[in-house]
Image: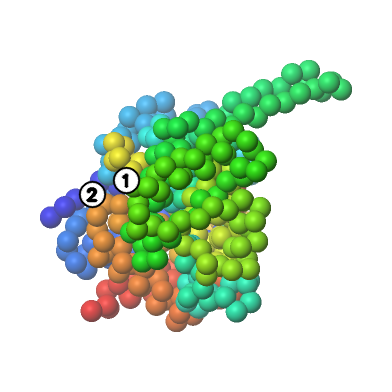
């Protein structure tokens, strides 16, 4: 039997609540089929550790994680710690340190959950957004001169490399090829941004030649927001830069009903390093400790993790259980229900155990 070594980093706010729920569902899956085992190690990294020691994770954190098969991450961020400290202190060092260059964000309207788009249901919106996760607009290059003075100048440089663009493009075409519609939309802003974005368009056309069975089109990011709202059924797999996909995936999450149902995988497709799976939402201190955090995003990302580990049957079983529980109306308040985290988790585990 296969044993997967999972590093769990629940971190802050509702992170521990949703990670506990996710681990419960994973255990139910492992036990049901007897096909695999999980060896989970929990790390107490996060804002509390920062307040105690001055660092969110230990200096050799990457070293400690590198032999795990996957990382299961909750949420990071606390009201009394600056956002850039938490972001650059934990998530980003892991994403960048392990070169998890593909950020994969599936979006679909789950049965029983209402989209803010009138008349749009599960059949009309089924996307995967692929976000370039290693360079582009968030490369951190730039600076400020004449700070605070009338002639102040600031630069924020986007770095796009051929290697970086080609590898994410190839990943996106491959993913599109694996989905029933075999359709990819490449998003840029190549009318206004004449260098990096034009290179994106050129590389897309080159890579497309290796995927003759994939149909693809190009969209400018502004027009893309309109298309996502007006014609969601026309889209399937989407690839965009770090910044553009960041924005588009928040829109996608909102269209799917709640941040509480949106998952993401930070993936190293070459499998040199562990990949990291997490709900998109943050630490949500307004509901922390109330027992009402929606665990669905975490179940979904657990399913992504199983898929990445090669446990396809368990991954699908978990999503079938989530679909069933949502369509039965066992929903937390953020998606219009009255159920608690525990209710949803127990219902999902029950559905996993009960399924033939
Ligand atoms: P961050 O600063 O990392 O963005 P945050 O605390 O602002 O974190 P968000 O994830 O941005 O939290 O979420 C915004 C709001 O959406 C939360 O304050 C919460 O009310 C709601 N929310 C987010 N995730 C969930 C969830 N899993 N279940 C229920 N409500 C959620
Ligand atoms: Mg927020």
Q: CA distance from mark 1 to mark 2?
A: 8 Å
The residue depicted at 45 percent of the width and 45 percent of the height is 205
Please state if 4 lies on the left or on the right of 351 as rendered. Answer: left
The quarter of the rendered structure image containing the N terminus is bottom left
- Kindly state the secondary structure of the residue where label 2 is placed: strand
Residue 195 against residue 173 in the figure, above or below: above
Q: Which mark is residue 4?
A: 2
First in sequence: mark 1 vs mark 2: 2
Looking at the image, do the residues carrying marks 1 and 2 touch, with CB atoms under 8 Å apart? yes
Q: Which mark is residue 164?
A: none
Ligand 1 located in image quadrant: bottom right
Can you tell which quarter of the image residue 97 is in?
top left
- How crowded pointer 2 is (Cα within 10 Å; few <14, some 14-19, many 20+) is rated as some
Residue 224: image location, x then y, percent: 61, 56
Observer-nearest of 26 and 305: 305
Can you tell which quarter of the image residue 177 is in?
bottom left
Residue 18: image location, x then y, percent: 45, 58
- Kindly state the secondary structure of the residue where label 1 is placed: strand
Can you tell which quarter of the image residue 175 is in?
bottom left
The residue depicted at 33 percent of the width and 43 percent of the height is 269
Residue 194 against residue 263 in the figure, above or below: above
Q: Which mark is residue 70?
A: 1
Seen from this angle, which residue lies furthest left?
A: 1
């Amino acid at each position: 039997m296969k044993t997967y070594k999972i590093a769990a980093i629940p971190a802050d706010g509702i992170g521990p609540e949703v990670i506990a729920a996710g681990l419960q569902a994973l255990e139910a899956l492992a036990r049901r089929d007897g096909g695999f085992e999980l060896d989970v190690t929990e790390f107490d990294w996060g804002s509390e550790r920062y307040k105690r020691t001055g660092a969110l994770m230990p200096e050799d954190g990457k070293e400690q994680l590198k032999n795990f098969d996957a990382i299961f991450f909750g949420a990071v961020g606390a009201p009394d710690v600056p956002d850039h400290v938490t972001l650059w202190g934990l998530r980003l060092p892991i994403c960048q340190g392990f070169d998890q260059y593909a950020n994969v964000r599936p979006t679909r309207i789950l049965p029983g959950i209402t989209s803010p788009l009138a008349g749009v249901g599960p059949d009309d919106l089924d996307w995967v957004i692929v976000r370039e996760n290693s360079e582009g607009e968030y490369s951190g290059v730039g600076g400020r001169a004449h700070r605070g003075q009338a002639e102040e100048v600031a630069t924020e440089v986007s770095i796009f490399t051929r290697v970086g663009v080609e590898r994410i493009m190839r990943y996106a075409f491959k993913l599109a090829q694996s989905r029933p519609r075999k359709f990819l939309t490449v998003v840029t802003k190549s009318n206004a941004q004449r260098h990096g974005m034009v290179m994106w368009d050129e590389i897309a056309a080159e890579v497309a030649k290796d995927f003759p069975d994939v149909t693809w089109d190009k969209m400018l990011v502004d027009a893309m927001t309109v298309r996502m709202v007006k014609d969601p059924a026309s889209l399937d797999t989407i690839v965009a830069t770090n910044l553009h996909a960041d924005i588009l995936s928040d829109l996608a999450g909102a269209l799917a009903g709640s941040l509480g149902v949106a998952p993401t995988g930070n993936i190293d497709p070459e499998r040199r390093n562990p990949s990291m799976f997490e709900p998109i939402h943050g630490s949500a201190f307004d509901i922390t400790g109330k027992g009402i955090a929606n665990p669905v995003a975490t179940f979904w990302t657990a399913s992504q993790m199983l898929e990445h580990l090669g446990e396809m049957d368990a991954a699908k079983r978990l999503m079938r259980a989530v679909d069933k529980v949502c369509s039965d109306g066992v929903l937390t308040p953020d998606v219009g229900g009255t159920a608690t985290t525990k209710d949803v988790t127990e219902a999902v585990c029950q559905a996993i155990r009960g399924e033939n």
